[in-house]
Image (tube, rainbow, N blue to C red):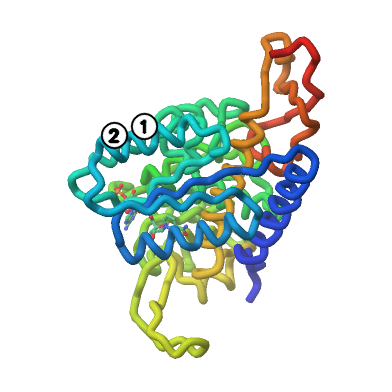
């Protein structure tokens, strides 16, 4: 194998350790912890397992975790009232409504009711707009794309001026990661091409990529001859291609495959993510990071005179400094203690 394996499981542990360290300091010095509420309506087994993973991770990090399970008979009005309650709760910094919702509930209406400043999933139209503007406007980058960017940055892959090709244009992966990679800033500043089912010559575009991000949901779509030697290949695809018996538990488990022919691609690429164990572990990790960012943001006061020129933003914060690892993706940030006379 010539490519360096980008291990999402290892990078997840690094980031979770950073977050846990921050949380314990915040708790010790200032008596605050990030608060995350997960709202689950009904008993969809896949939703239960996703929510359980999120809860376990939040608990492991020392967050305040509120698990709000509701029956599938919950009316849209009552769900909106519940969201309103958490929007007003100062101890809650992130609100997560697990999808799908029962058919009698308008999902869009519900998601849009979440306070954009607590929308740690980053899918509220306000946060989509903030992401498009970029820089310090970005509050919550959506979790899977944010995880992809972290994998690239922490693997030491050069993004500045790189040709990035994104396969797929979904709202949850393709569009946001393309948008993030062309912004001016750390881990970005790339030249981005987005390809999809109407693209005439997919192979030709992929071959140009220094960084190839594939999120199509088609097993083995990307062939080894489409990969530029030495390129960084990020395989977002998770495709169930069969079942097997787990050696550990003896239970039936899904056989997962990515969108890239991994065995052949790893001989050509410079860096590559495996499936599973690449992008997958990053999504919940970035959800936790967004919740911590939300807590910090709730303590921040930006005064007009605090914003200086040339991409340096001065935040006045009452309790000290925010680690740059938590604020990654927002450009250069300089932190100063909150002034006595600031609001
Ligand atoms: P999606 O909404 O189905 O979008 C797929 C995109 O890929 C579409 O834009 C589609 O083009 C494009 N596409 C499909 N087949 C193609 C082909 N043959 N050639 C070129 N483009 C093609 O999927 P998604 O939600 O973005 O998810 C993509 C994959 O990532 C899935 O396997 C999903 O399970 C996985 N995923 C993983 C994570 C994670 O690991 N945490 C998170 C999210 C998604 P059109 O727009 O033209 O139809």
User: Splitting the image into four quadrants, where does ligand 1 fall?
Assistant: bottom left
Task: From the viewer's side, name the closer residue of 19 and 64.
Answer: 64
Residue located at (42% from left, 73% from top): 256
Which quadrant holds the C terminus? Answer: top right
Mark 2 packing: few (<14 Cα in 10 Å), some, or many (20+)?
few
Residue 131 can be seen in this image? no
| 127 on left or right of 157 | left
Residue located at (67% from left, 37% from top): 327
Residue located at (51% from left, 33% from top): 89
Q: Quadrant of residue 82?
A: top left
Task: From the viewer's side, name the closer residue of 186 and 191.
Answer: 186
Tag 2–tag 1 contact (CB < 8 Å): yes
Tell me: residue 30, above or below residue 129. Answer: below
The tag on residue 113 is 1
Mark 2 secondary-structure assignment:
helix
Q: Position of residue 129 (x, y in %)?
A: 45, 27
Q: Position of residue 290 (x, y in %)?
A: 58, 42
The tag on residue 109 is 2
Mark 1 packing: few (<14 Cα in 10 Å), some, or many (20+)?
some
| 3 on left or right of 215 | right
């Amino acid at each position: 194998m010539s490519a360096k394996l980008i291990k999402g499981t290892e990078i997840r542990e690094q980031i979770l350790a950073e977050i846990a360290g921050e949380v314990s300091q915040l708790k010790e010095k200032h008596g605050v912890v990030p608060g995350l509420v997960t709202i689950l309506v009904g008993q969809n087994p896949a939703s239960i397992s996703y929510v359980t993973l999120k809860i376990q991770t939040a608990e492991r990090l020392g967050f305040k975790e509120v698990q709000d399970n509701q029956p599938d008979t919950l009316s849209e009005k009552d769900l909106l009232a519940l969201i309103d309650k958490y929007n007003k709760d100062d101890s809650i910094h992130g609100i997560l409504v697990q999808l799908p919702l029962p058919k009698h509930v308008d999902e869009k209406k519900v998601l849009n009711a979440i306070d954009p400043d607590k929308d740690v999933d980053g899918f509220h139209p306000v946060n989509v707009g903030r992401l498009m503007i970029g820089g310090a406007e970005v509050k919550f980058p959506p979790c899977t794309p944010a995880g992809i960017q972290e994998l690239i940055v922490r693997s030491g892959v050069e993004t500045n001026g790189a040709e990035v090709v994104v396969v797929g244009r979904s709202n949850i992966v393709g569009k946001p990661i393309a948008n993030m990679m062309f912004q001016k800033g750390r881990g970005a500043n790339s030249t981005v091409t987005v390809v999809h089912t109407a693209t005439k010559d997919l192979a030709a575009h992929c071959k140009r990529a220094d960084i190839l991000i594939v999120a199509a949901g088609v097993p083995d779509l990307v062939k080894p001859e489409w990969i530029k030697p030495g390129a960084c290949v990020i395989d977002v695809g998770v495709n169930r291609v069969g079942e097997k018996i787990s050696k550990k538990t003896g239970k039936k488990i899904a056989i997962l495959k990515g969108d890239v022919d991994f065995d052949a691609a790893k001989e050509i690429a410079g860096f590559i993510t495996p499936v599973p164990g690449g992008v997958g572990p990053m999504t919940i990790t970035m959800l936790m990071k967004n919740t911590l960012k939300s807590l910090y943001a709730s303590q921040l006061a930006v005064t007009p005179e605090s914003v200086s020129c040339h991409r340096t933003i001065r935040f006045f914060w009452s309790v000290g400094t925010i680690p740059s690892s938590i604020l990654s993706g927002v450009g250069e940030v300089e932190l100063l203690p909150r002034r006595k006379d600031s609001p």
